[in-house]
Image (cartoon, rainbow, N blue to C red):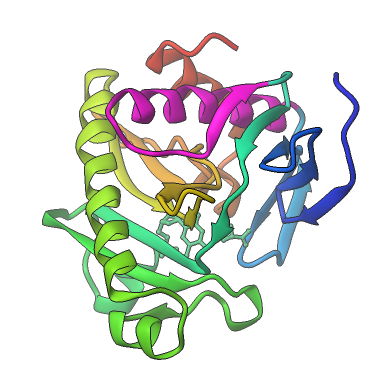
Amino acid sequence: MMPLGEELYSGKAKSVFRSENPDQYILHFRDDTSAFDGKKVEKLSDKGKVNNLFNAFIMELLAEEGIPTHFIKRLSDTDSLVKKLTMIPVECVVRNYAAGSLCKRYGIEEGTAISPPTFEFFLKNDELHDPMINDSHIVSFGWATQEQIQQMQTLTFRVNDVLKKRFDEAGMLLVDYKLEFGMADNGELTLGDEFSPDGCRIWDKTTRNKMDKDRFRQDLGNVIETYKEVAQRLGISL
Ligand code: TMP
Ligand code: ASP
């Protein structure tokens, strides 16, 4: 593994380090697994590696489809080189089937198909439990501009078109997912953070078995074994 530079930031599951290039950071995927805004935390062996390889595959797939991402290349099993971004502190969630907080909020039965898919913004703030916010809050509190809001929505739905199809072909439903964006130095709104089974919901198409972090949240067991199965179905070699 290459030596890591100064640690700039440590999140719940990943750490960001300086690299030799001031415009590029190293994303280090740890085995730490967190849910409920950090209330439930455990180390799951191999998770850092699985999520790093998973994320590299998805980011490359999205880049091929013309979506600007921060991903540059994988450096090791647990580390990837990414473009430095100035992150926008909101989370973009698209839902194809009802699950999680949407069911609680609106009384919709889990598994109900959502057509057209919904789009929601949440404020990235653990202490406030990531409250749902709208465009007006985002603009008035200066978290992003109207133009950035529009671009985040457009890109998040484009990701849905690409990934929904890909998961479907591999026998899985992409139920929902969360994306985060930032601004690159060239002024381009760019997909940041990660795409892995930690930040989305994936069900087996036939049995509707949960194949994502709900296995951890709901103590269903075989968390990483199931992540590996998702990876294998998508053709990711681990
Ligand atoms: P939710 O049902 O809890 O609102 O989450 C919707 C999807 O977004 C689910 O796949 C989990 C993901 N998500 C995160 O990964 N982190 C977050 O902070 C939030 C709000 C959602
Ligand atoms: N990722 C968030 C956390 O670690 C929310 C969740 O996945 O439940 O707390």
Magenta range is: 46-74
Rendered-image quadrant of the C terminus: top right
Q: In the figure, residue 78 lies in which quadrant?
A: top right
Secondary structure that dominates the magenta span: helix
Give the camera-side residue of 28 and 99. 28
Q: Position of residue 116 (x, y in %)?
A: 9, 56
Q: Residue furthest bottom?
A: 140
Residue 149 located within the stretch drawn in magenta = no
Q: Residue at x 29, y 27 (%)?
A: 167
* Residue 102 visible (yes or no): yes
Q: Residue at x 29, y 18 (%)?
A: 170
Question: Where is residue 87 drawn, in percent x and y?
Answer: 55, 60
Task: Please indicate, yes or no, whether residue 99 appears anywhere in the rendered image.
Answer: no
**Quarter occupied by residue 95:** bottom left
Give the image location of residue 165, x and y in percent. 20, 28
Drawn side of residue 7 relative to residue 91, left or right:
right
Please tell me in which quadrant of the rendered image residue 68 appears: top left
Q: Is 44 left or right of 61, judged from the image as shown?
A: right
Q: Is residue 15 above or below residue 211?
A: below
Quarter of the N terminus within the rendering: top right
- Outermost front residue: 186
In this view, 173 is above or below 110: above
Verify whether residue 68 appears in magenta. yes
